[in-house]
Amino acid sequence: MITCVCISGKTSESLEANFTCKGELTVFTFGDYRTRTQNSTWENNVVNVTVKSKTSHLAVRCRNYNQKPWLIGSVSNGLVTDTRWKCIGLKRGESAQILFWRKTADVSHWPQAFAIHTKREDSLWGKIPGISEDALWISTVEEDHVRLFCRRKLSDLAPVMTEVLSEGIFQATINDVGHSLRNHTQSQHQVSDVRECFEKCLADPQCLSFNLQHDSALPTRSCELNGVTKGQDPRNYVRRPGYTYYDRV
């Protein structure tokens, strides 16, 4: 499997980036020039890369043919892996339709990343030294891909998301994929991605969790805001293909 992450927008000074993934990692940096740093690593060995000034894109590729690829990382300007990254996955034998490392590549049709774990000690995969506490493990919602490609803009500013996260964080575990909480939906909305559903729940003081339709092929998806959590009513936490349950933490 391959995981790739790309970012655009030039830096004015050198930055440090740390990444790891469940597989073999390759890091690309490019702007007015292109360089490639290959670092093969397995099982959470962190790769450190210097992102030179005038770099417009950063790409990370992780390959693992034995399990679904997940990626986590952070850059010294405050940028972290989260649901604002755009990602696609390729199955075994499929070929990419675009050259993902080119800054002119059109990824407007790519869905946003799916995040399930923080890097904190209570996450499934433990704490990752050298990577920001705000970083999330990201991939896609699909389970059968063997390569994953993600892109995000690179800038000198820390992400605006930091302020939102200080007010509330929603996350799902791997077991929440394909599940939802029934009989507690207070309102239902059509949204374009998980970020929009997150914001609607955050704006509603009665919202403690939400169910999100995770079919990335749909232009909009159903976002159901719940007034309780699965911990408060575990009997109504049920299997529901095509949806993912998110808890407020």
Image (cartoon, rainbow, N blue to C red):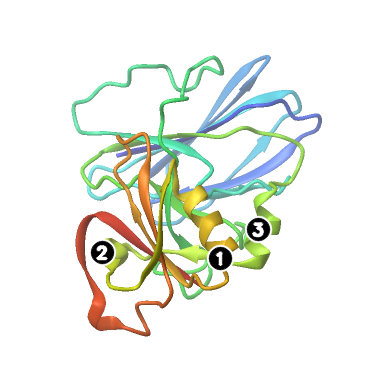
Which residue matches tag 2?
179
Question: Dot 3 lies on which element?
Answer: helix
Q: Is disc 1 surrounded by few (<14), some (14 to 19) or many (20+) residues within 10 Å?
A: few
Q: Which x, y percent locates residue 36? A: 54, 26
Q: Which x, y percent locates residue 58? A: 58, 31
Q: Which x, y percent locates residue 204? A: 56, 65
* Circles 1 and 2 in contact, beta carbons < 8 Å: no
Q: The disc labelled 1 sits on which kind of residue? A: Asp
Q: The disc labelled 3 sits on which kind of residue? A: Val
Q: CA distance from mark 1 to mark 2?
A: 22 Å
Q: The disc labelled 2 sits on which kind of residue? A: His
- In the picture, the quarter occupied by the N terminus is top left
Question: Dot 1 lies on which element?
Answer: loop
Displayed quadrant of residue 33: top right
Name the side, left or right, on which 169 lies relative to 226.
right
Which residue matches tag 1?
204
Say whether residue 189 is visible.
yes
Q: Residue at x 43, y 74 (%)?
A: 227
**Depth-wise, is mark 3 or mark 1 nearer the camera?**
1
